[in-house]
Amino acid sequence: MEVLVLPTADDVDVRAADIVAEQVSRRPDTVLGVATGSSPLGAYRELARRQAHGLLDLTRLTCFALDEYVGLPAGHPSGYAAVLERELVRPIGLPPARMRVPDGSREDLEAACRDYEEAVGLAGGVDLQILGIGANGHIGFNEPGSSLSSRTRVKALSARTRADNARFFKAPDDVPTHCITQGLGTILDARRVLLVAQGERKAAAVAAAVEGPVSAMCPASVLQFHRAVTVVVDEAAAGQLALTDYYRFVAEAKHRLRQEER
Ligand code: GLP
C-alpha cells in the first residue's frame, strides 16, 4: 500500500486528480470507479478544471458508481445518480449513458445487483477505483460486519452512516435505510485503487484501514489484500497513523528516483 501524506486537503484533491490523469493518459477509455460523499468532490472539480482547460480528455471514460440509496424516487437530488450527474458527468462533459449507477428504484433489487455486477464485467472491469472512507471504516456502503468477499447487494445502513449523511437530506428521517452497494470483493477486483481522506474526523478510520488488523469491523482494511492501492490523505486524516515518517521517506525516495530517470 502506498500512503501519501500531504499538507492540506487541497493537495489531496490535486494529487488524486494527478493519479486519475496519469491513468487516463495511458488509457483514454479507462473504466473509472467513482465514489460519492464529499471526499472526492475536490478531485472531481480539479479534473473538470483540467478538462475545461484542454489539459485532459475525460469524455471517453466509462464510470461505475460504488453505490446508491434504495427507494429514492428517480432524479431525487440526494440520490447518487443525481449527485454524480451534477458533480462529475456535466462538469467533465461525459455522455450520460457512460455513468452507470446501481438502480435503487427497481422493484427487483436482487436483479438490479446482478445486472450491475454483469455490467462491470462486460465493460472489462474497473481500471481505477476512487474511494472515500466513512468515519466507521466503510467503503462504498459496506458497513462494519460486511463480508470481506461480498459482491454487489442490498445492505442496511448503520445508524452512524445515516446520521453522517443526514446533512445531504432535508431531515434525518429522510435518509434511506437501505442501499445497493458494490461488495468488498467487487471493489477488490479493480486493477488499481485510490482512497482519499481529509480531516481529523477520518483519522481513526484511516489508521484502522491502513495499519490495523484486516477485519470486517473496518471494511476498508480489506484493501491491505490489494496489490495496487494508493491512499492519499492530508495531515489531519493521517493524524493517527503510526508509520507516517516511513511513508514520507518512501514517497520522497520515489520522487527522487523519478527525477533521476528524467
Ligand atoms: C458515504 C458513501 C461512501 C463515502 C463515505 C464517506 O456514505 N457511500 O462512498 O466514501 O460515505 O463520505 P464523505 O466523503 O462524505 O465523508
Image (cartoon, grey):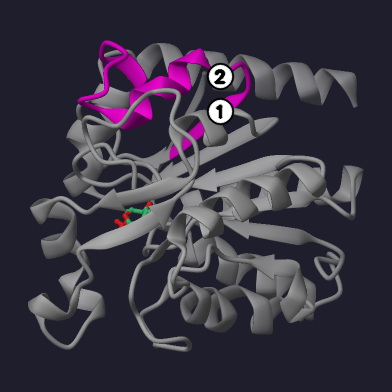
User: Within 8 Å of ligand 1, the CB of disc 1?
Assistant: no
**Disc 1 residue type?**
Leu
Task: Answer few, some or many: residues within 10 Å of disc 1's Cα (few below 14, many 20 plus, some between 14 and 19).
Answer: many
| Residue 241: quarter of image | top left
Evaluate whether residue 198 shows in this view: no
- Tell me the element at label 1: helix
Question: Residue 91, position in %: x, y?
Answer: 66, 81
Q: Which residue is mark 1?
A: 188
**Disc 2 residue type?**
His
Q: Which residue is mark 2?
A: 226
Q: In the rendered view, tell whether residue 109 sits above or below residue 140.
A: below
| Residue at the image position 46 percent from the left and 86 percent from the top | 74
Answer left or right for 5 relative to 119.
left
Placement of the C terminus among the 4 image quadrants? top right
- Tell me the element at label 2: loop
Q: Earlier in the sequence, mark 1 or mark 2?
A: 1
Q: In the rendered view, tell whether residue 111 sits above or below residue 58.
A: above
Q: Which of the pair 117/4 is nearer the observer?
A: 117
| Residue 164: quarter of image | bottom left
| Magenta segment includes 230 | yes
Residue 211: which numbered mark, if any? none
Task: Answer few, some or many: residues within 10 Å of disc 2's Cα (few below 14, many 20 plus, some between 14 and 19).
Answer: some
| Residue at the image position 66 percent from the left and 77 percent from the top | 89
Ligand 1 quadrant in view: bottom left
Q: In the rendered view, tell whether residue 72 sits above or below residue 163.
A: below
Q: CA distance from mark 1 to mark 2?
A: 6 Å
| Residue at the image position 69 percent from the left and 47 percent from the top | 118
- Labels 1 and 2 touching (C-beta < 8 A): yes
The segment highlighted magenta reads 210-232
Q: Which of the pair 143/50 is nearer the observer?
A: 143
Answer left or right for 17 relative to 73.
right
